[in-house]
Amino acid sequence: MVVAGRLDSTVGYAGAVDLVDHYPHASLAVLDDTGHALPHEQPDLLRALLTEWLARVERSI
């Protein structure tokens, strides 16, 4: 799971797009209204995204 904040002024989010191509089970989520401290800014949303992704990967393996 590659998660990035659209408002990340530290590293940006565009580079996250390139990561997805290198990992076969990767998914990309770019979150609006979120910056570099995504786990602190949107912890419930991040938890939900990771939980859903883990369930999908587990089913595909």
Image (cartoon, rainbow, N blue to C red):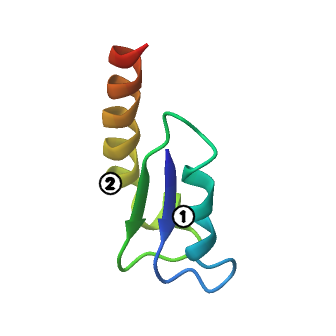
The one nearer the camera, 21 or 41, is 21
Does residue 45 appear left or right of residue 9 in this picture?
Answer: left
Residue at the spot of label 1:
17
Q: Image quadrant for the C terminus?
A: top left
Marks 2 and 1, Cα distance to the nearest angstrom? 19 Å
Query: Contact, CB < 8 Å: mark 2 with mark 1?
Result: no
Q: Is residue 26 above or below residue 30?
A: above
Residue 20 % position (x, y): 55, 51
Residue type pointed to by label 1: Val
> Residue drawn 35% across and 33% down?
51
Residue 32 % position (x, y): 35, 76
Q: Residue furthest right?
A: 10
* Residue 13, picture quadrant: bottom right
> Residue drawn 41% across and 24% down?
57
Residue 27 % position (x, y): 43, 46
As drawn, the label of residue 61 is none
Residue at the spot of label 2:
45
Q: How many marks?
A: 2
Kindly state the secondary structure of the residue where label 2 is placed. helix
Does residue 35 appear left or right of residue 58 in this picture?
Answer: right
Closer mark to the observer between disc 2 and disc 1: 1
Kindly state the secondary structure of the residue where label 1 is placed. helix
Crowding at dot 2, Cα within 10 Å, few <14 / some 14-19 / many 20+, comes out as few
Crowding at dot 1, Cα within 10 Å, few <14 / some 14-19 / many 20+, comes out as some
